[in-house]
Image (cartoon, helix red, strand yellow):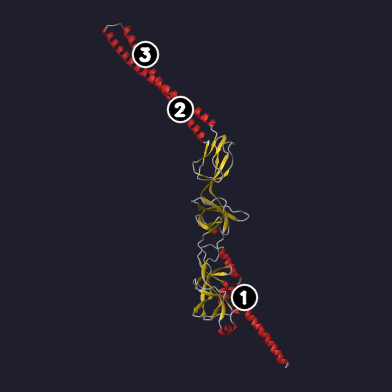
Amino acid sequence: MQVNTRKILIASVLGVGLLTAGCGSLPKESAEAESQRPRGKQEGGGAVPVDASIARTGVLRQEPEYTGTTTPFRTVSLRSQVEGRLLALNADVGDAVKQGQIIAQIDDALLRTAQNQAEAELAALKSEVARTRAQVSNARAEVEKARAQLVQAQADSQRQQKLVKEGAIAQQTAEQARTESLTAVQVLRAAQEQVRTEQQAIAAAQGRVVAQQAVVAEAKERRSYAKLTSPITGAVLEKVTEPGNLLQPGNEVLRLGDFSRVKVVVQVSELELGKIRLGQRVKVRLDAFPNQTYTGQVTRISPAADITARLVPVEVVIPNSNAKIGSGLLARVNFETQTQARVIIPETALQGGERDKETKGQGGQDKGRSASSSSSSPQSQPPKRQGMVFVVKQAGDKVTVTARSVTLGDRADGNVEVLSGLQAGERFVTRSGKPLKDGSTVSISAISEQQS
């Protein structure tokens, strides 16, 4: 009698243990869903409770998001080029300005006086040139007069020489006429030399006029510096001085920003730098405008990284045609890559021996391969491995599963890429209460993803 009682107790303990182990093999969610089913239907139907999901495409690893601050495409300092007191300043911080717009006025009294003096000196030099030209005209008239006298003297000398040969006049009279002819030659040469001298004087006077014209132009240019004009179209970022202050050449008055485009500088890890190139398209979101995404471009990659953090400054420029984006806004930058979207499933969906071979046969090496593939170049192909999933098929009220061999790609964060064998939109088993086989009848848990 005691032996039989002991056998009954042992059988009871083993039964409770087997029941507990069987319940433990179910996933928590499936177990809860199974407990909600009518007990009689569960035991009599023989359907294996499973969790199911719908296959969707996506990117296994989301590209990192970088934050930066918007700044003007370029910043220009408006500075004084002359000495003087600032009389007026017609712009304040935030005001929009256009290229060539007069923004400030500096006292130009001294500059105006200097210009007037230069112009007076120019007028005097021009008068000197005119006077010299008149002297040249007089000298040329003297040349013509001396030439006429020379012709007359030479004619008289020839006539006198002829009369001397005929014995009509004395030799002395002929010599006197010849002397007068030679004198007329000397007078003509002197008059011609005077013309050349006056012409040289004109050239020198004209040179002084040209030099003085440059002085007048410089004086006018310096006086124009008294009016400070905007060199760009943009907005006033900072006002450095106030009207009434004395300015020296080089003193800053305003700081202007060009907002036709906006620049964002982000710090990129050296591990991600290989994926970024000049001219690459970039998606930029601004917290100030959460419903809009801007498309920018990489315009500069710094050749120098921070020696402590190993971060490299990358400059991104985005358009701002309506001048809506200002300075100092928080920007979130995502670099577009050529990563192809694939079907992504959780690793728990891998069933049967293939999954055991992947996880147990390779162990830590699989994780190491995934980690190394994340830092590889975009051109590297993910390792191809085989696995098996169960695809859900429904015919009326009967739900079955079909074993499907799939080619696996990279893995990360508990998910795996499916390169082939499973299409987007197909329903597959993610967890099962019991081992499945091809054609097994299953019951879909309440927490499973439902097809629309």
* Amino acid, disc 1: Lys
On screen, 207 above or below 60? above
Residue 442 falls in which quadrant of the image? Answer: bottom right
Disc 3: CA contacts within 10 A as few (<14), some (14-19) or many (>=20): some
Q: Nearer the viewer, residue 435 or 338?
A: 435
Which percent across, then down, holds residue 282? Answer: 51, 57
Q: Nearer the viewer, residue 292 or 257?
A: 292
Question: Residue placed farthest to the left in the image?
Answer: 166
Residue 436 falls in which quadrant of the image? Answer: bottom right
Residue denoted by label 3:
183
Residue denoted by label 2:
209
* Amino acid, disc 3: Thr
The residue shown at (33%, 16%) is: 148
- Contact between marks 2 and 1 (CB within 8 A): the answer is no
CA gap between label 2 and label 1 equals 102 Å
Residue 313 seen in the figure: no
Question: Residue placed farthest to the right in the image?
Answer: 2
The residue shown at (38%, 21%) is: 137
Disc 2: CA contacts within 10 A as few (<14), some (14-19) or many (>=20): many
The residue shown at (62%, 75%) is: 28
Residue denoted by label 1:
28
Counting residues from the start of the chain, the first of labels 3 and 2 encountered is 3
Which label sits in the foreground, 2 or 1?
1
On screen, 139 above or below 409? above
